[in-house]
Amino acid sequence: MSKQIEQKEQLIQALIAGDYPDSQGRYGPFGGRYVPETLVGAFTRLEQGVSRWLDDTKFRAELNAELRHWVGRPTPLSPAPRLGERWGAEVWLKREDLAHTGAHKINNAIGQALLARRLGVQRVVAETGAGQHGVASAAACARVGLPCEVYMGEIDMTRQAPNVDRMKRLGARVVPVTSGDRTLRAAIDESMREWVSNPTDTYYLLGSAVGGHPYPYLVRELQSVIGREAHQQIIDQAGGLPDVAVACVGGGSNAIGLFHPFIADRSVKLLGMEAGGHGSGLGEHSATLVHGRPGVLHGTYSMLLHDDDGQIQETHSISAGLDYPGVGPEHALLAATGRATYLAVDDNAALDALNECCEYEGLLVALETAHAFAGAREYAMKNPGKRILIGVSGRGDKDLNTLLEHSS
Ligand SMILES: *Cc1c(COP(=O)(O)O)cnc(C)c1O
């Protein structure tokens, strides 16, 4: 074996052994915690809280009860026979679109809200881009009885007005962010500032598997319920493991949740689909792993879309939930080792896949999710007769306005 292949194999073995994150919050060369001095205390307290509670028997029982009776878990694994026939494949769908609030985000939000209550904070702050994580956070905080403030870029507030209203109805205060790019990136910065201004009384509920340690770990653990259920369900219902598991990747939370319980099953290919937007040029896509380079954003060392001067690039995707210039550090390691493969599909391919899924399976999936369907379809065309597991991260009702704009 060449030295490079040997090194990759060692990293994969460490992934399988569950060695990541290590005590520094690293996933091989990626991850860690790159935060200003003012945030160190808050992150340290959070890390202590996570190791105190996450595996605590009573906390687990409480979380499992909420997942079952309030979120609606386990979500079904649906066969997709008509798509399968068209694609020449056996297709199975893990249905996070059927979870409360219509996407996987609630798994993370309720878990962190319960943690926040255990930590005895007075309020929760959360960031949101398109509003999906804001809605999930507002719902989860109402459920556990904690006040919730959602920071949202003022550009996003205009684009996603219905979600602003949903958050308010769920009792959250929505705070417009007028600094920076006035979208998700600035909203994350602002939430961190809010957290640091009152770190003992405030909990920061981060929405994806990104950020400084322990967030990528915490979010992975909370989202892995997707893959654990799917692993058991596909064995029970299909009689064996899939050949490939496919998910869309924004920050990477639904994908790591689906992939993680399959990492040790080396026969299962892991395929992450990024947003190819409308081109591979600067600012035309948000395919971080496909086009990016290593760098630090929001406290973690991972792959990133930035230029030679370290300036973060503008990003574009038809799906707001994939429109982020970074990606979780564990995905960066999965990509670097080759244990998972990441590809980009463009806006039009995602739209086609969405329409096909509506027409042949009666499912209006989210535009983010449609990227996973497009990737699965491409895989099926090249590899006939395979068993394909697709992570359906959410439903598409929220996207009807965008779809109207693109159907002419
Ligand atoms: C937010 C969102 C995503 C992208 O976030 P990840 O952290 O990458 O999972 C994907 N699908 C849906 C439906 C979403 O709401």
Image: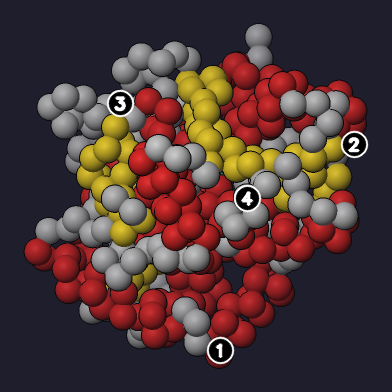
Q: Secondary structure at mark 2?
A: helix
- Mark 3 Cα-neighbour bin, 10 Å: few <14, some 14–19, many ≥20: some
Pointers 3 and 2 in contact (C-beta within 8 Å)? no
Q: Is mark 3 within 8 Å of ligand 1?
A: no
Q: Which residue is mark 3?
A: 314
Q: Earlier in the sequence, mark 3 or mark 1?
A: 1
Question: Can you say whether 74 is above or below 77 in the image?
Answer: below
Q: Is mark 1 within 8 Å of ligand 1?
A: no
Q: Secondary structure at mark 4?
A: loop
Q: Is residue 193 left or right of residue 98?
A: left
The answer to whether residue 119 shows anywhere in this view is yes
The amino acid marked with disc number 3 is: Glu
The amino acid marked with disc number 1 is: Thr
Could you say where residue 226 lies in the image, as x and y percent from the top left? 64, 59
Q: Which residue is mark 1?
A: 57
- Please give the name of the residue rendered at 24% of the width and 69% of the height, measured from the top-left corner: 43
Q: Secondary structure at mark 1?
A: helix
Q: Kindly report the distance in space between the C-alpha atoms of the residues bearing marks 2 and 4.
A: 26 Å
Q: Kindly report the distance in space between the C-alpha atoms of the residues bearing marks 4 and 1.
A: 31 Å
- Please give the name of the residue rendered at 87% of the width and 51% of the height, measured from the top-left corner: 238
Q: Kindly report the distance in space between the C-alpha atoms of the residues bearing marks 3 and 1.
A: 44 Å
Q: Kindly report the distance in space between the C-alpha atoms of the residues bearing marks 2 and 1.
A: 40 Å
> Quadrant of the image for the N terminus?
top left
Q: Nearer the viewer, residue 212 or 132?
A: 212
Q: Which residue is mark 2?
A: 81
Front: mark 3 or 1: 1
Q: Kindly report the distance in space between the C-alpha atoms of the residues bearing marks 4 and 3.
A: 36 Å
